[in-house]
Amino acid sequence: MPAPSTTLRDIVDRRVREADPHLVAPLDRNRIRCFACGHQCPIAEGQPGVCKVRFNRGGKLYVPWGYVAGVQCDPIEKKPFFHAWPGTLAYSFGMLGCDLHCAYCQNWVTSQALRDPSAISPPLDADPEALVSDARAQGAQVVVSTYNEPLITAEWAVEVFRQARGAGLSTGFVSNGNGTPQVLEFLRPWIDLYKVDLKSFDDRHYRQLGGRLQPILDTIRALHQMGIWLEIVTLLIPGFNDSDDELRRLTEFVASVSSDIPWHVTAFHPDYKMADRGWTPARSLIRAAEIGQAEGLHFVYAGNIPGRTGSLENTYCPTCRALLIERIGFQVRANRVGPDGTCPECRSRIPGVWS
Ligand code: SF4
């Protein structure tokens, strides 16, 4: 049931606990530094960080705890994860706030709740055991922290993941990837899947969104090195990040980390403060996908406009080109990947988590 508080500021003031010691360091004059995201804010006494949800009180860092702003159970393909237990359900939960402020955010009601007075999203008191029990009751195989930026609420996510693992479920993040070495080490023991939203390959674009490109690239490399299953999504926005040159550099980077990382290029629709352009046309998604394939990526997918991008919703064996997984939208129509993760035709190992 809705929490009794009346303002969102009440939420961040009351529903908190102290940060994990790995995610904070003392500075001079009662200031502290937060390591939960790539901003690495130095925070003065009585002030919040850029995300508005982690704050310094008495020289201690307080972080969100004990609530959710939304939960939902969906096909795992919606996250999207295409190489992790296809056709299963993912139970998603989110809190409030974000370290970026993208004008086109599709989750702005929760992500911008502490910045934008028109984003009204009342919290629900929650405890990890009840969330996991709800996830199991709904038949989910994976519990995913999403909707707001999960890095800034990493302590709560880990507490939920601890319960989820104990109940035999797997765990994942749907994140902007603005991480730090500290937060990735903190998450590492508890996380199976990580989706990074690589929004652009131009630092000037990232600065318009409130971030920087380099921490996202560092996070992608680190996640791959850690062996956490990683998929990357780029929302293709007409006139923002859809030039051939930018897409070439972006996919060249992903392929330099590993050509086996699935790359999803998805269609923008007008949302929040970006209403000055229309949906991404199917032909732009297909063009972007062809650039990714030319740069050597083995698994490129087009999303958000089911049935209009030819074979780009399916998975094919990169060795023998056999059709392995047939999809339309979030629905898996056929899955021929063996339980051991191999192609049934040529026995090549298909990267992902299958069994
Ligand atoms: S999570 Fe990021 S934005 Fe928030 S206080 Fe920590 S470093 Fe700053």
Image (cartoon, helix red, strand yellow):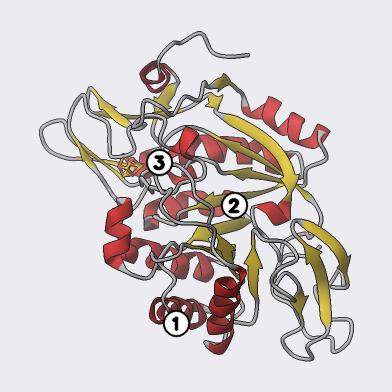
Q: Is residue 210 left or right of residue 342?
A: left
The residue wearing badge 2 is 191
Q: Is residue 42 left or right of residue 187?
A: left
Helix, strand or loop for disc 3: loop
Q: Is residue 290 left or right of residue 101?
A: right
Question: Can you name the residue that lies furthest to the top here?
Answer: 4
Helix, strand or loop for disc 2: loop
Please name whichever residue, 352 or 336, is drawn nearer the observer in this view of the structure.
336
Please name whichever residue, 207 or 1, is drawn nearer the observer in this view of the structure.
207
Distance between the alpha carbons at the discs numbered 3 and 1: 28 Å
Please name whichever residue, 326 or 280, is drawn nearer the observer in this view of the structure.
280
Res 231 seen here: no
Identify which residue is drawn at 74% across, 90% down.
319
How many C-alpha atoms fall within 10 Å of the one at disc 3: few (<14), some, or many (≥20)?
many
Which quarter of the figure is the C terminus placed in?
bottom right
Mark closest to the chain's N terminus, 3 or 1: 3
The residue wearing badge 1 is 248
